[in-house]
Amino acid sequence: MRLLVTRPEPDAQRSAAKLRARGHDVSIVPLLRVEMLHTSLGEGGWCAVAMTSANAVRAVEHHPRLAELVRSPVFVVGRRTAEAARAAGFVNVTSADGNEQDLARLIGARLRGSAGPLLYLAGEDRQCDLGSDLAAAGIRVSIVEVYRATKASRFPLQAEQALIDGRLDGVLHYSRRSAQAYVDCAVAAGILDRAREPFHCCLSSQVAEPLITAGAADVRLATRPEEAALLELF
């Protein structure tokens, strides 16, 4: 199949390699560009660390306080972030193996009533609100933004032409923002009708929302929010 991967680098290359190993023809068009932010982590004294993206791990893996961070228990949203955290030196890593709501429930059950704050290493634009979700469990959340993801405003010409010519069978979407960027780029190019035609594989119903709203007919949802389930959709 002729597939388009829209996730940011370097994860796009890893996903493309998996797809090519299965015999697919893969194009990579990162619709988000991730920029690491050099920010202070505050006073410390955290009861644990939370991360909802491997980008957060990349943002702190060379931080001058990394040695302090890796001594803390860390809670992450899924397996990929857990793998990245362990590779960066975190030892006590627990994954929710789900979405942000699953992560909030896990943290609430494990850390209820903790004296110290939870350090949430977050992106500048985010869907979940761990502070509100964990307030009922008596857990204070210190949010530190360590990366930002900037949306592309236009498709590269090669990708735009491939959509116009109908040379793509499917598109893989890993985040709601990248799915929205796909729709916005299609509108900017005046090719929304053509961009809706391939099948769209989405990591979750939240990721799929912009595509469904835009009228895409064949939107497929992974049974669990991880790449292995996404690759089972075609």
Image (tube, grey):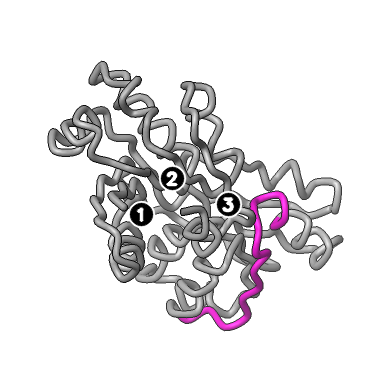
Crowd around label 1: few <14 · some 14–19 · many ≥20 (10 Å): few
Residues 19 and 32: in front is 19
Q: Does the magenta stretch include residue 97?
A: yes
Q: Position of residue 224 (x, y in %)?
A: 63, 57
Magenta range is 89-103
Q: Mark 1 points at which residue?
A: 38
Query: Residue reaching furthest left?
Result: 157
Q: Mark 3 points at which residue?
A: 222
Q: Distance between the residues labelled 1 and 3?
A: 34 Å
Residues 22 and 203: in front is 22
User: Residue drawn 53% across and 77% down?
Assistant: 70
- Earlier sequence position, callout 1 versus callout 2: 1
| The quadrant where residue 164 appears | top left
Residues 176 and 221: in front is 221
- Earlier sequence position, callout 2 versus callout 3: 2
Q: Mark 1 is on which residue type?
A: His
SS label for mark 2: strand
Q: Does the magenta stretch include residue 218?
A: no
Q: Mark 3 is on which residue type?
A: Ala
